[in-house]
Each structure stands twice: as structure tokens, then as C-alpha cells.
Image: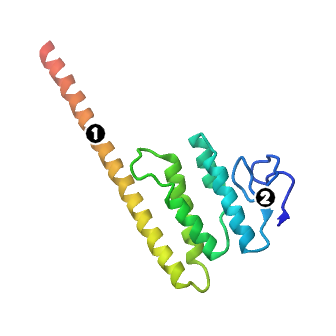
Amino acid sequence: MSRLKENCPSCGAPGAGRICEFCGTLLAVPINTSEEKEALNDFHHLLAGQDEAEKRVAFLQHGFIPEDPSNLIDAGVRSVALIDFNADEDEPGNAAANRLRAIMLKLKIMEAPTPDITRAISEFERVLNKHEHIEKRDSIIGWVLLAVIGIVLIGACFFAIAVML
């Protein structure tokens, strides 16, 4: 594996391994598929060690995405596991969904998609559709609650005015 730079090109942090410990950027170019797999493992190991949601989001947004189709599929499966379908306003989950979209896009633009790639794309699309459906549902519920509160406040104002007259 050949080093790209002494410091991370994305955040400027000093780098020691294959992946920047602060933002998840690839610091060393993998020479082959197995080194790329090791870099992906390193990325997910470092991601698991991020305690704060903000850091996990940054890691997912700027993190290493492999080139090899099998490693891309593995990265996608690992991203699916990070999407929390039960959390409200889950920023790391949204960042994981965005990472999955980027992985899926890379798989879609490959020259000769294999049956495994086609199946992975289909499954990833299903997961993203479910995530988007839940996001829309939560938005609608929020707007409905806001409208109800507004109506109650307006009604209270009219009641207060009627009582004063």
C-alpha cells in the first residue's frame, strides 16, 4: 500500500494508518483487493470507535468508499446496518443512507454488472425506499402536530378575546 500524504488531504490531521482517524479519508492507496478490504475493515473499526454522533456523521460523509465490486457490496451491507429505522432525526442514520446512495451509484455505473451487483443494487434500493418512506412519514406527522398546535393556539386567542368582550 502506498502512502498518499503525511497529513490527511481532507482534514489535515496527521495520519499513521490506512484511514484518517479523524474523518475516515483513505490515506494510503490499496494495491490490490485484499488491501482494499483491510482498509474497509479499518474504516469500520474506526467508525465504531466514534462516540459522538457528529463525528460518526463526518466519518460517514467523508469516509473511504472502495472500488472493487465485492468490497463495495460489503461496504453497502455495513452501511445498511447503520441505518436506524426507529430513531427520530437520526443524523448518523441519514449519513449512512447517503453513504449507501453513493455506494449504490458506484455499483450502477460499473461497466459489466454481475448478477451479484444487480441483486445488491436492488436490495440497497429497497432499504433506501424504506428509509425515505419513514422520513416522509415522520415529516408529515410533524407538520400535522404543528398544525394542530397552531389551531389550538388560534382557538385559545379567539376564546380569550370573546371572554374579554
Residue at coordinates 72% horizontally, 56% vertically from top-left?
25
Q: Position of residue 94 (x, y in %)?
A: 50, 52
66 relative to 97 in the view: left or right = right
Q: Which residue is mark 1?
A: 145
111 relative to 164 in the view: left or right = right
Q: Amino acid at mark 1?
A: Leu
Q: Nearer the viewer, residue 79 or 58?
A: 79
Residue at coordinates 60% horizontally, 86% vertically from top-left?
112
Q: Is residue 128 above or below residue 89?
A: below
Of tags 2 and 1, the one toward the viewer is: 2
Q: Position of residue 6 (x, y in %)?
A: 87, 53
Residue at coordinates 79% horizontally, 72% vertically from top-left?
31
Q: Position of residue 81 (x, y in %)?
A: 50, 58
* Lower sequence index among marks 2 and 1: 2
Q: Which residue is mark 2?
A: 27
Quarter of image, res 125: bottom left
Q: How would you rate the neighbour count of disc 2 (Cα within 10 Å): few for under 14, some for 14-19, many for 20 or more? A: many
